[in-house]
Amino acid sequence: PALAIGGVVLLSAAIARRFGGGARAQLFAGVGAGGAGFALAVGHLLSTATFDYLLWTVAIWLLVGLLDGDDQRRWVALGLVLGIGMQNKHLIGLLAVAVLVSVLATTQRRVLAGVWPWVGAGLAAVIALPNLLWQLANDFPQLEMARALAERSDGPIAYVLEQVGLLSIVLAVPAAVGWWLLIRSPELRRWRPIGITFALLFAFFLVTGGKSYYVAPMYPALLAAGSLWFEKLG
């Protein structure tokens, strides 16, 4: 678990650097991602949520590069991460769907041109297939579990308020600013799909009674964007 959170710290700093952040921004992004309430909690547990936090961050780091013009063959690496993530926790599948919708909704849809995005998607599907076949053979117990959890939901107000705990009072503001910058800043326009992805997932889990921590793996990216604002404060 500690190594997983350490990986999140390094990747968050790398994302901040890709966004154009200097040393101070990278330090803030790394410390924020590793010091958020959710990270401190799962960093002491050998749980699926711990590695979900890492795998989502790896996937978003790869996506950040692809949206910035990296070699299209990186889609294969992204597919590998998504496939492995599906063996850990099915929520990363919703990340993939939200990313696809978000990319198609922006001018960045051009990154889907060519064969490599679909090679990556195929690889993810092949890796996840045994898991999905088992779910099918057993009448999708994961959906039954999801319904049971939704029935025990604390409601939308608690869902929203608990986001502060998942971050901390100190980090909630830069995370919110980071999301706004991803949505509105001209300098971060190429990464707008990431801001839209967060909005889609946040709304989906809010409406369906999902656990508040389901969106926590998106916070390293938001903090990386918010680190640009933090850097300018100085």
Image (spheres, rainbow, N blue to C red):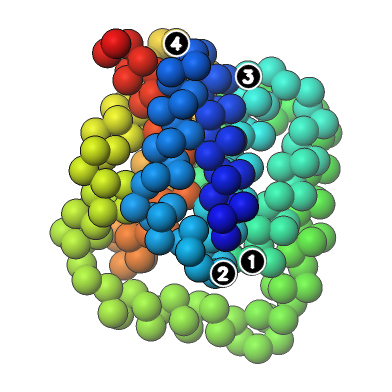
> Which sits earlier in the primary sequence, circle 1 or circle 2?
2
Residue 125 on image: x %, y %: 76, 58
> Which sits earlier in the primary sequence, circle 1 or circle 3?
3
Which residue extends farthest left? 157
In the depicted structure, whether residue 47 falls above or below residue 26: below
Figure quadrant of the C terminus: top left
Cα–Cα gap, marks 3 and 4: 12 Å
Q: Secondary structure at mark 3?
A: loop
Residue 178 appears in the figure: yes
Labelled pair 1, 4 in contact (Cβ < 8 Å): no
Residue 222 appears in the figure: no
Looking at the picture, which amino acid does disc 1 mark?
Asn
- Crowdedness near tag 2: few (<14), some (14–19) or many (≥20) residues, C-alpha within 10 Å: few
Looking at the picture, which amino acid does disc 2 mark?
Leu
Cα–Cα gap, marks 1 and 3: 28 Å
Labelled pair 4, 2 in contact (Cβ < 8 Å): no
> Which sits earlier in the primary sequence, circle 3 or circle 4?
3
The residue singled out by tag 2 in the image is 46
Residue 99 on image: x %, y %: 55, 41
The residue singled out by tag 1 in the image is 88
Residue 61 on image: x %, y %: 61, 34
Q: Is residue 185 left or right of residue 108?
A: left
The residue lying at 72 percent from left, 73 percent from top is 131
The residue singled out by tag 4 in the image is 187
Discs 1/4, front: 1
In the depicted structure, whether residue 209 falls above or below residue 98: below
Labelled pair 3, 4 in contact (Cβ < 8 Å): no
- Crowdedness near tag 3: few (<14), some (14–19) or many (≥20) residues, C-alpha within 10 Å: some
Q: Is residue 14 left or right of residue 161?
A: right
Q: Secondary structure at mark 1?
A: helix
